[in-house]
Amino acid sequence: MLRISIFTAILISLGSLVRADDALPALDKETAGKISYRADVWPIMKRHCWGCHSGGDAKGGLSVDTVADMLKGGDGGAMFEVGKPDESALLEMITGDEPEMPQKQPPLSAAKIQILRQWIFAGAKDDSTPGDVGRAVHIPETYRFAPAVTSVAFSSDGSVLAAACRSEVVLIDLVGEQPPRRLPTDSDLLSHVEFSSDGKLLAAIGGSPAHYGEVRFFNPVDGTVVSSRRVSHDTLFRGGFAPDNNAIAVGGADGAAHVIPVDPKGEVRSFDLHSDWVMDVAYTGDGMMLVTGGRDKSTKVCSVETGELLRSVDGSTEWICSVAADDQFVIGAGKARIPISYELKIALSGVEVSGAGNGARPISKRAQYAKNFETQSGEILDIATSGDRKLVAIAGAYGDIRVYKIGDRQRTALIGNTPNPVYGVALNADGTRLALGSKSGQVQVYELPEGKLIKSLVPVPMAPPAESVTAQ
Ligand code: HEC
């Protein structure tokens, strides 16, 4: 057999795969040998391919969970042969004028393609350890870009603020001088953090899109994990603790509201109420009902005991992104800019409905029980009540935050010039402080009602702006 050098082989394959004017950079053994599957290759596969190429429903029969899976390949055969990156199906899929993969997403950067090529070239070594294969979430020691803060929450005594920063929760000391404490989770992206009203638990909710939802309960005093579990096959969104603090109810990308007990042996109950993502869930003050709002543009009320739909209280023209409740009122708000308050007793009394099941609607009483708040100046992304459920704060993609009394919908505070957009908002127990988390990665705390800024910080540790590392 004719032996050709690797170099020649590359030249040949280059000719067949890419046009001469965008030739791939050279491969060299020394750099290639330093590439780690675990640290360099897996993060690329996870971010760009894993969503479609994993688990029972892996597209094209191809799973990229492990190196062995990649070598096995999919319906069309192996993804690559060790040592020969440029003759591989992998390279063919991710290069060219309009790369086929990742499907429906921007192509991989040249730097990432080079990492994959070098790794295969150097032997496609697997340096993962059992335990971290596939699912492990990477939490950097320091960040080069501050991750968006998706949710914030005050502890019941107001001494600590929790912020959800990508895969970790950061606890910020508001009274002493303690440095921020970092609590890691297994969620790719956290969507919600909340303290129980007795101060004993901190819940972190999130998951990995198209793979799993995760709920993790921490002891906020010492940071230990009280219990943790996977729920559903997709990410979980916002929710709220039951008034007795024994469970948390959260929305899911699977269209269900999930009631998840703190006790890891307790049964998870899932109520299929919506035809699209359930973005937020809240318990009514008495703990008997759940309010849910979702991407199907509806706000609904169901029984906690049976999961039975009591009423689709309203339909909106836009997504409902957040809900809240006290003893008398339910509030739904979202992209339509107008938060609406529904008086529960009237909404649920003597219901005359047309339609059945999820489509059940009141015949004519909406005007009696639905009352608009003031229109906000943009899309609403999060609303939060004070611990005593007297006030509600409303925030979103528009640069100010407003606070209202739930009882009469009168505004009590307006904070202008906030970061924009705000992803998460929180009030303390008596509504004298407000916190926000922004897309830009900032957390701010204000005093109410005057709206005085008392703290502003990026909660995660940032890398000094030195040399830039690999492509992320
Ligand atoms: C949004 C979903 C999606 C993403 C993300 C995605 N793929 Fe795919 N992939 C598919 C589908 C669907 C198929 C099968 C049908 C086809 O070939 O178009 C496929 C097929 C493949 C195949 C052929 C499998 C076989 O043996 O037939 C390879 C190789 C592949 N993808 C690699 C990748 C790589 C590498 C990435 C990440 C850089 C990626 N894909 C990201 C959806 C996706």
Image (cartoon, rainbow, N blue to C red):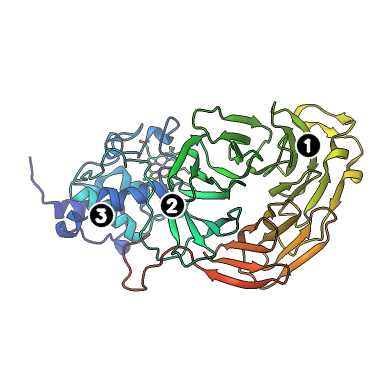
Question: Horizontal placement of 59 versus 30: left or right?
Answer: right
* Looking at the image, residue 331 lies above or below residue 230: below
Query: In the image, what residue type sits under mark 1?
Result: Ser
Q: Quadrant of ligand 1?
A: top left
Density class for disc 1 (Cα within 10 Å; few <14, some 14-19, many ≥20) is many
Pair 1/2: label in front = 2
The residue pinned by badge 1 equals 312
Gap in angstroms between the C-alphas marked 1 and 2: 38 Å
| Image quarter of the C terminus | bottom left
Label annotation for residue 14: 3
Identify the image quadrant of the N terminus.
top left
Q: Earlier in the sequence, mark 3 or mark 1?
A: 3
Q: Amino acid at mark 3?
A: Leu
Residue 5 picture location, percent across and down: 11, 51
In the rendered structure, which disc, 2 or 3, sits on the residue that comes first in sequence? 3
Q: What secondary structure is marked by label 2?
A: strand
Q: Could you say which disc has been placed on residue 183 in the image?
A: 2
Please report contact status of discs 1 and 2: CB closer than 8 Å, yes or no. no
The location of residue 375, given as percent across then percent down, is 80, 61
Disc 3 vs disc 1: which is toward the camera? 1
Q: Is residue 209 visible?
A: no
Mark 2 or mark 1, which is nearer the start of the sequence? Answer: 2
Could you tell me how far apart the alpha carbons at marks 3 and 1 are, in whole angstroms? 60 Å
User: Which residue appears at 41% of the width and 33% of the height?
Assistant: 55
Residue 300 visible at all:
yes
